[in-house]
Amino acid sequence: MNLSELEHLRSPSLSHQSRSLYLLYLRPLREQGEICADLYAICNYLSVPGSRLSTQVSLQLAEACLDELFREGLIAPLNGRPNSSWQNTALSLPLYEAELNRLPARVFRMTQDWRPSANFKATCTLCGLETASFTDRELHGFCSYWSGTTELRNQAAWERAFALRLKKQRSARLSRPAAQEAQAREPLGHPMAERSIPRAEGSPFERRT
């Protein structure tokens, strides 16, 4: 979160729901790539079911939250608002993206709080990944490994390294079940099958005649 974003989020014209929507929903999505306004998903995020303080958010309230963020300059439509609704509107986060464009291509050591930029989706595409999605565990593992080294890279290079790591991990997960299935199909007596069957020490098959 940069200083410009924080300054605008402190505006008294923003409701608590709008701040929460930006900080915990829209901003993390934008960091993983382009985002499109989904009012039903926003309603689901802002609703708090199953408690004494449960709330159900309407589509109108979701629209109002996006209107507040738009007036404050935190979000903007990429191609206008069709039919005066935010539904399915591609969004930009001007203050977040402006800060990215000002960042120099300096090199730095990895830290535990590092995150990919809005350009990560393009990096993943160039590396051969179908999506730019990742889990907190995958990101934490990457940061933990490299923060223990003295490696220096710029933001783009770190993002490429992370994308390649994700690609390698996913390829490994896909190939492991295939190898297990192939082994299970081997007929008994096949060299590969025999190697997979442990023999007890002193087995009669090992006695010399």
Image (cartoon, rainbow, N blue to C red):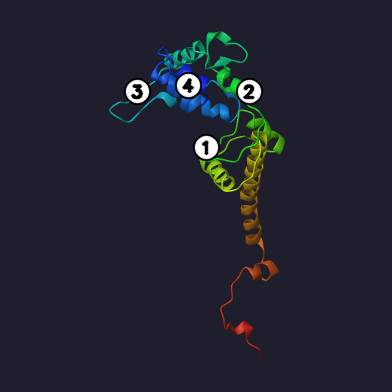
User: Is label 2 in a helix, a strand or a loop?
Assistant: helix
Q: Which of marks 3 and 1 is nearer the N terminus?
A: 3
Q: Which amino acid does label 4 sit on?
A: Leu
Res 114 visible = yes
Mark carried by residue 6: 4
Cα distance in 3D space between marks 4 and 2 = 17 Å
- The mark closer to the camera, 1 or 2, is 2
Q: Is residue 56 above or below residue 137?
A: above
Q: Earlier in the sequence, mark 4 or mark 2?
A: 4
Which residue is at 57% across, 45% downward? 147
Cα distance in 3D space between marks 1 and 2 = 20 Å
Q: What residue type is labelled 2?
A: Arg
User: Is label 3 in a helix, a strand or a loop?
Assistant: loop
Which residue is at 54% across, 20% downward? 37
Mark carried by residue 113: 1
**Mark 2 lies on residue:** 102
Residue sitting nearer the eye, 1 or 41: 1
Mark carried by residue 55: 3
Residue sitting nearer the eye, 123 or 63: 123
Residue 82 x/y as whole percent: 58, 10
Residue sitting nearer the eye, 7 or 195: 7
Q: In which quarter of the image is residue 165?
A: top right
Cα distance in 3D space between marks 4 and 3 = 26 Å
